[in-house]
Image (tube, helix red, strand yellow):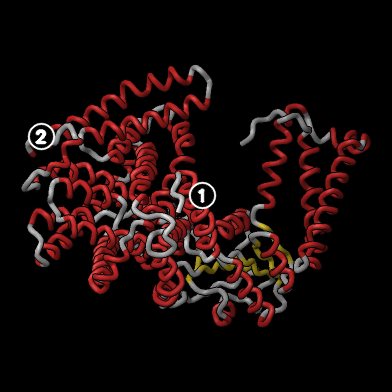
Amino acid sequence: MDKSFLFQAIVYLASAVIGVNIAKRLGLGTILGYLLAGVAIGPFVLGFVGEEGKDIMHVSEFGVVMMLFVIGLELEPNLLWRMRKLVIGLGGMQVLGTTIAISLAAYFLGQSWQAALAIGATLSLSSTAIVMQTLNEKSLLKTSSGNSAFAVLLCQDIAVIPLLAVFPILATEVVDNQSASLIGNFSGWQQTLIVLGAIAIIIVAGKYVVGPVFRWVAKTRQRELFMATALLLVFLIAELMIVVGLSPALGTFLAGVVLANSEFRHELESDIDPFKGLLLGLFFISVGSTIDFGLVKDNFLLVIALVLGLMFLKGIILYVLGKSFGLKGDQNMLFAVSLAQMGEFAFVLFSFAGQYALISAGDIDLLIAVVALSMALTPLFFVVNERLILPKYFTKEKSNRRADEIHDKNPVIIAGFGRYGNIVGRFLRANGVSATVLDNDSDRVELLRRFGYKVYYGDASRFDLMKAAGAETAKIIIIAMDTPQQCLEMVAMVKKNFPHLKILSRAYDRNDSFDLMESGVDFIYRETLDSSLRLGADALQMIGFRAYQTHRAARTFLKHDERVLADLIKHRHDSKSYISVAKEKITELEELILRDIKDEGILERDSGWDSDKLRTAPKS
């Protein structure tokens, strides 16, 4: 079979396109798509790639190198200082505790204490690439679990530095294959000093040399030259680190940290990002294609026991630590599941340990298969956690709290007091209108009470709670719950039991609006429509439109859009007809607003409302 470069490129790119597409449609995430694509084209399934897959992995490891460089760029000193408790406390305890636990297990399984320590420290690390990309795809980076996971990953990435320095000291013998490194002929202590010296050189050069070079290149105003310089920096540092026997990912990570406060930070991030994503995908395909399924088959029970045992052990340690650092329920479970796998640094560290004969070659092959399988299982664990564990155990935990007793009787009831309902409630309160507020997020209720809001804990979709809240005598129910499904269930309950109430409901988009309209809601408010029109009106003013003219255009747009919604609902299940009617309405709206703009009578009448002083007033 032809194994030319072009053929290999076609195989890898085609497998990525198909694998990731299928994985995304199944809700499994892109990383698992890449890994499965690698398994499919590997020697144990289709056989499109064989031993050369290992060579390609060496190239694709630059994806990990670039990812660490970008992570380093995001590590502003101020951010590190703000997160010091989590990075040093939670992250440090995770690395230390997991290293001790796995090292003891490895020692009692027959490894020397040096090998056990190297294995424990390496397997204590998680996959920054998988976790960060998955959390980002699921928009979980800003949650408490995402924040804690990010801090632990930072600590783990930093921990690679001392690990690379300590491995030579642990070595009991030096093998010949170190001759490629300039430090191969030095003693362990001398190599440690050289490692620390090389790191110091990168830090100093990054601070005093790289900045001036980028300023010099930036003066050419050639974007492609700047991009080439950014790639040159990454490759140069990687090569230098390889020459002195260090991890290229570690070197670029440090360089990124040094450049985090430079004026070129964002430019570097945007230039590197496309290459990082493509090479990371290639890296995971290579990992999938090089999993030795023959070894896995021969040691099937041992491999499965190691994969599940290690992930369970790491998960237990993470869960205990997360609980001690204040993570609650579902967030703590997500934190433990996200970091339970082993990471890409294991490939680098096991290779490094092999050079120093810390771990036997056979054990390294077995452990690499375990690491790769744990990475492949992570997206599945996310799915199991989301669909089975969290709904069954942690939602129930939250609902076990008894609802508050309600004594207020007000004309308005607000169901849900998150970011949307909160604004409505504050507006009503500022106008002297009292409302009975219900919310089923106990943490949010406690927080709002500290701000002086009278919020009752409880599930507003319960008939008895709504009755206790005075629904039989109230006039209006405002539904501002967190999900469209919750809003729909609430509407159904109100329509059935309290039909006299006027229902004002939050909607997320047009489809959500259609569902609410069909369920009989009196008034629907799409949560981004008004703010979008306000922004558009401000933009028009800034380019010279009169203030009242933009206000009138925004009102026209809003009223027209609400009328169109009522027409489009008749065509929502016929996409061809829906698109045709929608296009007609868009044209109709544009013609309507343009007619208004050209109408001299309207302009003359409205000019009295708008002075030059008002038009040029600064925006708040």
Q: Which residue corresponds to the image point at 38% horizontal and 36% vertical from the top-left?
A: 73
SS for dot 1:
helix
Q: Amino acid at mark 1?
A: Ile
Q: Which residue is mark 1?
A: 10
Crowd tier of the residue under label 1, counting other residues whose Cα lies within 10 Å: few below 14, some 14–19, many 20 or above: few
**Toward the viewer: 84 or 44?**
44
Q: Quadrant of residue 415?
A: bottom right
Q: Quadrant of residue 422?
A: bottom right
**Outermost residue, right side:** 601
Q: Which mark is residue 185?
A: 2
Q: Which mark is residue 176?
A: none
Earlier along the polypeptide chain: callout 2 or callout 1? 1
Q: Is residue 450 visible?
A: no
**Toward the viewer: 451 or 407?**
451
Q: Amino acid at mark 2?
A: Asn
Q: CA distance from mark 2 to mark 1?
A: 42 Å
SS for dot 2:
loop
